[in-house]
């Protein structure tokens, strides 16, 4: 199976993200602060920390409750990122006087509402790829030309699946209520683990030695230790797994949805710009979906990248395509032994589902290469819509397994 949309074009190779300065992300807001209101919008630059860590440090320094801090999107910790957060109205001078390591307040303005998740148009990326081939600029521009015209494959990518590449396996097991398998995946496969203590714990777990697993497991593995404590106390695998934080369980379920979606992107990689009979399409300017009645009549809009075919993130509320696309989606669900009743059986873990475009527009593109000391470095800039990942662009350009997580 073809791995790249631009498989006909050779990649640049190279290494990404050797330092935070190699990966810079700028949030593109959905709207600008109006200058008045009971909330403060802070444009913040952070270095080498997660969005949650940045918000916690600012909230603590200002004496604001963390739940009162608003944000539009999460940004990678291993990067320089510039994004907006909101605070309840306080003395602005206190904010301007903040001196927090790794955090710079770039701007403060008032607005009428709290910033909410999703209140952004997209993100602009500035990326350096080190040690690329000599003709990297030509290669990258050829690839970018294709991506600008056809669109970028909208993969979630490996960052969604965790360090063990198995978050999706945990999610699938939870959805099928195979909690013994979910617990086994959470503890991990000893053959894939390099940390000695973690590996010993996983081996002990596979031998049903929960006490031995707990003794070996490093202290920082709080969720895994919580799971083991539950099993040692006599809980069933179902009880022990469902006792884990809801946020973590939802992450596993989301990873499973993402993996199923990524499979659909892969299956249609040769025809991302082509509408199929039965497609549900996505209007990029409006963020809305509609069923295609005449796919040939709508193809011209798809050619202009105004609309795109969508894939299924399964759930009890998700629209299912019909026709040729519907056959693909139904076969995927059948292969996974999923039916519509499974998505809302678990208390507090209902999976609603949605549609997601199989491709996304690439905009504001620039690319140039330069010689720096003993290596060739490629500088890239581009913008992507909210909810999509730079990984998808970079894997096409480099044609390598060294992908960032932004």
Image: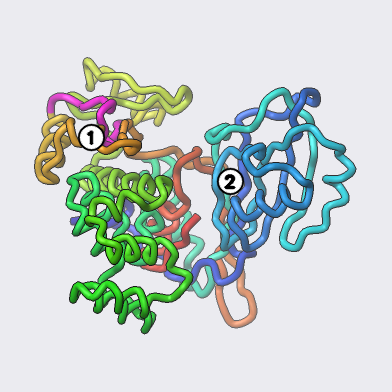
Residue 156: x and y in percent read 37, 49
Q: Residues within 10 Å of mark 2 (few under 14, many from 20)?
A: many
Is 163 or 122 nearer to us in this picture? 163
Judging by the rendered image, the residue that carries numbered circle 2 is: 124
Q: Viewed as shown, does residue 230 lie left or right of 109?
A: left
Asked if residue 150 can be seen in this view, the reply is yes
- Relative vertical location of residue 108 with respect to residue 262 in this rendering, above or below: above
Residue 136: x and y in percent read 48, 66
Residue 250: x and y in percent read 37, 45
Q: Viewed as shown, does residue 159 lie left or right of 297?
A: right
Q: Is residue 322 magenta?
A: yes
Q: Residue at x 86, y 39 (%)?
A: 92
Q: In the picture, which quadrant includes the N terminus?
A: bottom left
Is 59 or 219 nearer to us in this picture? 219
Q: Is residue 204 magenta?
A: no
Q: Quadrant of residue 85?
A: top right
Judging by the rendered image, the residue that carries numbered circle 1 is: 345
- Relative vertical location of residue 327 with respect to residue 228 in this rendering, above or below: above
Residue 345: x and y in percent read 23, 35
Q: Residue at x 60, y 64 (%)?
A: 22
What are the residue bounds of the magenta stretch? Answer: 309-323
């Amino acid at each position: 199976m073809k791995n790249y949309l631009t498989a006909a074009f050779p990649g640049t190779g190279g290494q990404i993200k050797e330092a935070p300065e190699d990966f810079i992300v700028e949030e593109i807001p959905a709207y600008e602060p109006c200058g008045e209101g009971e909330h403060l919008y802070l444009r913040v630059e952070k270095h080498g920390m997660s969005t949650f860590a940045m918000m916690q440090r600012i909230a603590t320094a200002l004496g604001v409750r963390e739940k009162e801090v608003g944000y539009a999107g999460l940004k990678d910790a291993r990067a320089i990122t510039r994004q907006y957060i909101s605070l309840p109205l306080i003395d602005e001078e206190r904010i301007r006087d903040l001196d927090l390591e790794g955090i710079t307040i770039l701007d403060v303005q008032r607005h009428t509402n709290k910033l909410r998740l999703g209140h952004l148009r997209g993100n602009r990326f500035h990326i350096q790829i080190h040690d690329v081939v000599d003709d990297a600029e030509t290669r990258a521009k050829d690839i970018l030309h294709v991506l600008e015209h056809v669109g970028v494959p909208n993969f979630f990518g490996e960052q969604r699946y965790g360090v063990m590449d198995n978050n999706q396996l945990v999610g699938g097991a939870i959805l099928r209520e195979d909690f013994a398998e979910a617990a086994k995946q959470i503890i991990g496969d000893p053959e894939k683990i390099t940390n000695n203590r973690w590996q010993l714990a996983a081996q002990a777990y596979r031998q049903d030695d929960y006490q031995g697993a707990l003794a070996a497991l490093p202290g920082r593995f709080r969720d895994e230790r919580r799971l083991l404590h539950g099993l040692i106390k006599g809980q069933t695998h179902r009880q022990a797994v469902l006792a884990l934080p809801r946020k973590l369980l939802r992450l596993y379920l989301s990873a499973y949805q993402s993996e199923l979606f990524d499979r659909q992107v892969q299956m249609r990689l040769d025809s991302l710009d082509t509408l199929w009979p039965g497609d549900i399409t996505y209007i990029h300017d409006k963020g809305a979906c509609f069923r295609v009645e005449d796919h040939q009549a709508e193809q011209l809009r798809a050619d202009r990248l105004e609309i795109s075919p969508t894939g299924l993130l399964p759930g009890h509320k998700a629209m299912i395509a019909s026709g040729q696309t519907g056959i693909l989606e139904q076969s995927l669900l059948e292969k996974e032994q999923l039916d519509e009743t499974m998505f809302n059986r678990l208390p507090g873990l209902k999976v609603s589902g949605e549609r997601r475009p199989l491709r996304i527009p690439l905009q504001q593109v620039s690319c140039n290469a330069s010689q720096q000391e003993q290596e060739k470095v490629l500088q890239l800039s581009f913008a992507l819509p909210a909810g999509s990942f730079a990984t998808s662009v970079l894997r096409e350009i480099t044609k390598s397994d060294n992908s960032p997580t932004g």
